[in-house]
Image (cartoon, rainbow, N blue to C red):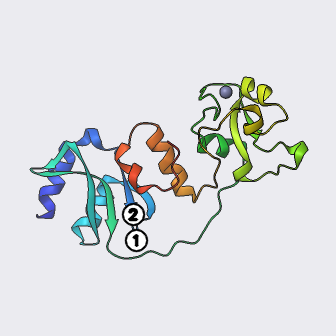
């Protein structure tokens, strides 16, 4: 496929200009999120392959818009922890109460093992709860209160996982799901 043919059809598809592509490392781990234009350039340069495509968008004849690509070479990424903050806890939990699935305002942070009983501020011990559930649970563990958690609290792997999770939850990138580890349903 010659480059100029892509250019012509890319300009015709201006409506998909905002579409994003998930880039996987050679090891299949998510690496970053880029524009589909950059993704195509990487593919044209022989640096990446397409793993998932959006069949509703034809870029050129039988070429579809890549939504997930994988690099042929390995990029070393320094490990960065995701900050434990209210905003990030809500994001991890898809802005919904992990006891009753309520989505909306009035969400609070619940300590799974209450602080008064030795529960600490770590990712694995904090969860999103609506005020009603938080009050109902009170000073008890989920087992004692008979309030099972929808998703067991976990430590997010990376900032990228976070961003990808957000996009998947927004409904834009269902096909990214199988490549993002530790994703809340
Ligand atoms: Zn609730």
- Label 2 vs label 1: CA separation? 7 Å
Please give the name of the residue rendered at 27% of the width and 59% of the height, measured from the top-left corner: 51
10 Å crowding of disc 2: few (<14), some (14-19), many (20+): many
Residue 58 appears left or right of 14: left
* SS under mark 2: strand
Q: Would you say the residues marked 2 and 1 are in contact, meaning their CB atoms lie under 8 Å apart?
A: yes
Would you say 75 lies left or right of 36 here?
right
Considering only vertical position in the picture, is 108 above or below 120? above
Q: Position of residue 156 (x, y in %)?
A: 60, 55
131 vs 81, nearest the viewer: 131
Using the rendered image of the protein, determine whether residue 84 is visible from the camera's viewpoint.
no
In this rendering, which labeled residue sits more in front, label 2 or label 1?
A: 1
Q: Quadrant of residue 24?
A: bottom left
Quadrant location, the N terminus: bottom left
Q: Residue at x 14, y 60 (%)?
A: 4
Residue 98 in the figure: left or right of residue 70:
right
Q: How many marks?
A: 2
**Quarter, ligand 1:** top right
Q: Which residue is mark 1?
A: 27
> In this figure, which residue is indicated by the disc labeled 2?
24
Name the disc covering residue 39, or none: none
Side (left or right) of 29 relative to 104: left
Q: Position of residue 20 (x, y in %)?
A: 37, 49
Dot 1 crowding, Cα within 10 Å, few <14, some 14–19, many 20+: few
Residue at the image position 71 percent from the left and 25 percent from the top: 106
């Amino acid at each position: 496929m010659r480059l100029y043919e892509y250019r012509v059809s890319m300009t015709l598809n201006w409506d998909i200009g905002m579409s994003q592509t998930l880039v996987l490392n050679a090891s299949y781990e998510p690496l970053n999120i880029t524009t589909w234009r950059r993704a195509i350039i990487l593919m044209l340069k022989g640096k990446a392959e397409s793993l998932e495509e959006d069949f509703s968008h034809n870029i050129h004849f039988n070429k579809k818009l890549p939504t997930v690509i994988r690099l042929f070479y390995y990029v070393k990424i320094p490990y960065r922890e995701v900050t434990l903050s209210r905003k990030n806890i809500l994001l991890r939990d898809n802005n919904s109460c992990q006891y009753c699935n309520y989505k909306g305002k009035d969400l609070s942070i619940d300590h799974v093992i209450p602080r008064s009983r030795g529960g600490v501020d770590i990712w694995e011990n904090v969860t999103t709860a609506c005020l009603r559930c938080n009050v109902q649970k009170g000073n008890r563990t989920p087992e004692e209160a008979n309030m099972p958690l929808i998703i067991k609290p976990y430590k997010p792997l990376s900032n990228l996982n976070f961003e990808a999770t957000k996009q998947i939850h927004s409904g834009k990138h269902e096909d990214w799901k199988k490549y993002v580890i530790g994703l809340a349903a």
